[in-house]
Image (spheres, rainbow, N blue to C red):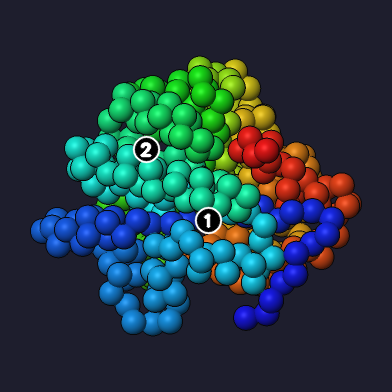
Amino acid sequence: MVKVEKNPNYKRIATEEAFCPVEMLDLWKKVLASPDCDPGFTSLIGFYMSSTAARPQHIMKCLTDLGEQRLAHMDESGIDRQVIALTSPGVQVLDTDSAVSFVKVANDELAEAVRNHPDRFTGMIAIAPQNPAEAAKEIQRGTELGLRGIIVNSHTHGEYLDDPKFYDIFAAAEANGQPLYLHPNTPPRNMIQPMLERGLDGAIFGFTVETGMHALRLITAGVFDKFPKLQIILGHLGETLIFQADRIDYMHQATVRSNRYASMKAIDRKPSEYLRDNFVITTSGFAEEKPIKYVQDFMGADRIMYAMDYPYQHANEQVIQLDNLNISDEDKVKFFQTNAERVFGIE
């Protein structure tokens, strides 16, 4: 793999980088062995934990390391800092009691790694949405530990955060000034089958369909009217929503006027306005200039930032490709460094 030198003009902060405590692998093995294991979890984690192919072996080895190997890979990639989060699906595939208990273990481990490497690592708070009240408490505790941002790996047993029972999570995020990173998960069992039939359930397609839908549910349910200060981070260039924004605006207004669905009521603004004001977009896995510039033009230069998606997409060549983006020097500094520093409160 080509080595990438540090850039003298800006720090490269990668904002969607994953880890997994070793103990979580044992919990996941138990889930995989259960008689009615979620098919998306079997497809994703079952593959990564059993495959002997080079890429999944590399991923599993890198996920559990928060020390010298990760730092060496960062140095080889020219990455100054990683913003690290518990990998998908995290504790969200577990039963409620196990999830609430283990999320504290994961956050403590990540907080220790941040203390050991404060100039290289920033950690996000993992939560167990299965118990929203406990999740809110963990947001407070994680903030006190020095973690920045909240990771939610999309749906939890097929349930989505637009349900009012999860609103304690948004209230805690607002109260603690923490952005929430809405990260992909495999589609739930009532959505996944046509994708499984053609191997499309993961990052190739299923992730963006499922997570983009989740984000749009938050918008159309009026979550941001109730929590106007809430900031959601959405990876993979906005999970296609940016490219569909004009059509979403038109069809949302038409559907509301028609009274077609009892579940779709009027909201205060156009969906695209919430995208621009309540979301921050990361590139995670994208390096092509044209779509990145389109998203930057739509969102504004202050609302798009770099992510590698380590270790799932560990490609040093893409760092060089992004260094050569045809954007202004000022916007490039925002893209690689200062937007992440602002969003995550990195000093």
Instruction: Place residue 200 in its image quadrant.
Output: bottom left
Q: Amino acid at mark 1?
A: Glu
Residue labelled with disc 1: 17
The image shows residue 219, relative to residue 80, as above or below, that is: above
Residue 87 lies, in percent from the top left, at 41, 54
Q: How far is disc 1 from disc 2 in space, using C-alphas?
A: 17 Å
Q: Which residue appears at 43% of the width and 82% of the height?
A: 54
Local secondary structure at mark 1: strand
**In-front residue for pair 245/277:** 277
Query: Relative to 192, is 231 on the left or the right?
Result: right
Residue 1 lies, in percent from the top left, at 62, 81
The outermost residue toward the left is: 35
Residue labelled with disc 2: 127
Mark 1 crowdedness (10 Å alpha carbons): few <14, some 14-19, many ≥20 = many
Query: Relative to 189, is 346 on the left or the right?
Result: right
Q: Amino acid at mark 2?
A: Ile
